[in-house]
């Protein structure tokens, strides 16, 4: 992976894309704002606080490096700034819980991991 989001993870920073014109956050990296169509988009650092939107437990990991982690918890979490992101979480994390973003490395790649706040 490459790009501002992945580079942020490697630097232990959670980033999201935002429109400089209207301030709307973008759900994925885009070339133009989803709200106003402006092409002046910038990357911002998120504070890292979020609310859990959905939770799932993974028992059959897709690759060998992740098989060593199984079973593991994945969540969709809504950042306080608005965007929703997927990341790992502590076992027992539940919908509606407040969490804080953190980072960990698997197979040479930095990933997002939420802990209960």
Image (cartoon, rainbow, N blue to C red):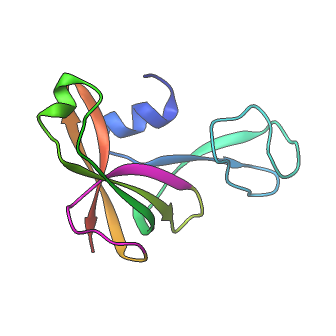
Total number of numbered discs in the rendering: 0
In front of the other: 49 or 70: 70
Q: Residue 91 lies in magenta, yes or no?
A: yes
Quadrant in the picture for residue 95:
bottom left
Q: Residue 9 lies in magenta, yes or no?
A: no
Span highlighted in magenta in the image: 84-95
Residue 57 vertical position relative to residue 54 in the rendered view, above or below:
above
Residue 46 vertical position relative to residue 61 in the rendered view, above or below:
below
Quadrant in the picture for residue 115:
bottom left
Q: Is residue 91 left or right of residue 96?
A: left
Residue 48 vertical position relative to residue 18 in the rendered view, above or below:
below
In front of the other: 76 or 60: 60
Which residue is drawn at the image coordinates 36% and 49% (left, top)?
Answer: 87
In front of the other: 31 or 74: 74
Q: Quadrant of the N terminus?
A: top left
Q: Position of residue 8 (x, y in %)?
A: 41, 38
Quadrant in the picture for residue 37:
top right
Q: Residue furthest left?
A: 68
Q: Position of residue 61 (x, y in %)?
A: 25, 34
Q: Position of residue 9 (x, y in %)?
A: 36, 39
Q: Quadrant of the C terminus?
A: bottom left
Which residue is drawn at the image coordinates 15% and 40% (left, top)?
Answer: 69
Which residue is drawn at the image coordinates 28% and 35% (left, top)?
Answer: 110
Q: Position of residue 13 (x, y in %)?
A: 37, 46
């Amino acid at each position: 992976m490459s790009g501002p989001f992945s580079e942020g993870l490697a630097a232990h920073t959670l980033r999201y894309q935002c429109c400089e014109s209207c301030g709307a956050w973008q759900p994925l990296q885009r070339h133009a704002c989803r709200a106003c169509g402006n092409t002046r988009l910038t990357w911002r650092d998120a504070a890292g606080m979020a609310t859990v939107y959905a939770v799932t437990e993974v028992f059959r990991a897709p690759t060998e490096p992740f098989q060593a982690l199984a079973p593991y918890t994945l969540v969709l979490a809504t950042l306080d700034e608005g965007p929703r992101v997927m990341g790992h979480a502590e076992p027992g994390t539940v919908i509606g819980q407040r969490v804080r973003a953190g980072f960990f490395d698997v197979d040479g790649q930095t990933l997002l991991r939420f802990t209960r706040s």
